[in-house]
Image: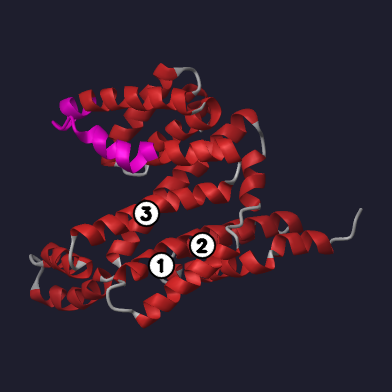
Amino acid sequence: MRFLANTIMRGPMAAILVTSVAAMLGVLLPPLGYLSAAAVGLVTLRLGLAEAGKVVVGSIVATAVLGGLLVGNPMAPLAFLLALWLPLLVTAWSLRRTADLARSLWLAALFGVMVVLGFHLGVDDPAGWWRGFLHRLVEQAPAEQQDVLLPVLDEMAGLMTGMIGAAVTLGVVLSLFLARWWQAVLYNPGGFRSEFHALRLGRAATGVTLVLLLAAWMQPPGLAMLTDLLPLALLLHLLQGVALVHGLVARTGANVGWLVAMYVLLLLPMVMTQIALTLAVAGMVDNWMDFRTRLAAGKPKQ
C-alpha cells in the first residue's frame, strides 16, 4: 500500500495511471474502485483541489479510451466521476481545509442523501419499484425457491433505497479513510490513527438520528424519505462506534484481540446486524458521554 501511495505522489501522470487503471479494474472487482477514489483523495489532501482536478480530468480521458477499447462504452468515466471522484474531491478538500474528520463524514453522507432524494423524486413508490425489481430477479427460479425468497424480498424492498444511499456513503468514507491513511504513512506517521481514535459526530447527530428513528416508528404519511435516511444516520454512528472501540483499546492498552473480535463479528452474517446496531448505539451515547475524554480524565498523572 505504501508503494502505491508513493507511486500516486510521483506526479500527475502517475496519479492518473493509478486512478484510471484502478477504476477500470473496479468494474470487474468493485472494491478496487475505492483505490481509484482514494488516489484522487490523496492528491487533494496533499496538493489541493487544482492538482486533484487535473488528475480527475486526465483520468476521465484515460478511462474513456479504456472503456471504449475494453467494454465498448466510453461513457464509463461519467459513473466514476459522479460515484467516486467528485465525492472524494469534496470530502478530501474539506478535510484538508478544516482537519475535521467528522465534518468530512457529514459531507460524505450528503452524497447518500442525494441518492435517496433523487430516488424519491424520480420514482413515485420506491419500495414498490424495488419489489418489482427483486421479483424479476427470481422469477426464473423454481417455484419452491420463490415461495421462500419472495417474502424475504418483500421485506427487503422497503429498505433498499436507504441501503443504497448508505452504501454510497460508506464507499466515500472508506476511500477517504484510505487516502488519509496514505497521507499519514507518507508525511505524518500516526496522524490518521489519532484522528480516527478521536472521531465524534456531536450531540446534534444523535438528535437527528433519534428524530429519524421516531419517524421510522410512526411512519407519517408522505414522509417515507425520512425512514430511508435512517440507515445513513446509523452508518455514521456505527463508524463512530468503531472509532470508540479503537480509541478505548488504545487508551487502556487492551489486547488487540478485542479489535479482531469486533471485525470478525461484523462480518458474520448471523450476528452482523446486532453487532452493527450495538456499535451504532454506542456511538450515539458517546456523543453525550464522551467516554474517551472521561477515561483520559480519570487516569492518574504519571
> Mark 1 or mark 2, which is nearer the start of the sequence?
1
Left or right: residue 148 compared with residue 179: left
Instruction: Please name the amino acid that badge 3 sits on.
Output: Gly
Q: In percent of the image, x 47 and y 34: which residue is there?
A: 41
Q: Label 3, label 1: how many angstroms apart (C-alpha)?
A: 11 Å
Residue position marked by numbered label 2 in the rendering: 238
The residue mark sitting in front, 3 or 2, is 3
- On residue 103, the disc is none
- On residue 112, the disc is 3
Q: Is residue 238 magenta?
A: no
Secondary structure beneath dot 1 equals helix
Residue 284 at what x, y percent from top left? Answer: 57, 68
- Residue 32 shows in the view: no
Q: Is residue 84 magenta?
A: yes
Q: Nearer the viewer, residue 199 or 219?
A: 219
Instruction: Please name the amino acid that badge 1 sits on.
Output: Leu
Q: Are marks 3 and 2 in contact (CB under 8 Å)?
A: no
Left or right: residue 248 compared with residue 264: right
Part of the protein shown in magenta? 66-86
> Mark 1 or mark 3, which is nearer the start of the sequence?
3
Using a 10 Å C-alpha cutoff, classify the residue at mark 1 as few (fewer than 14 neighbours), some (14 to 19) or many (20 or more): many
Residue position marked by numbered label 1 in the rendering: 230
Q: In percent of the image, x 59 and y 40: which residue is there?
A: 98
Residue 239 at what x, y percent from top left? Answer: 52, 57
Residue 18 vertical position relative to residue 283 in the rendered view, above or below:
above
Q: Residue furthest front?
A: 222
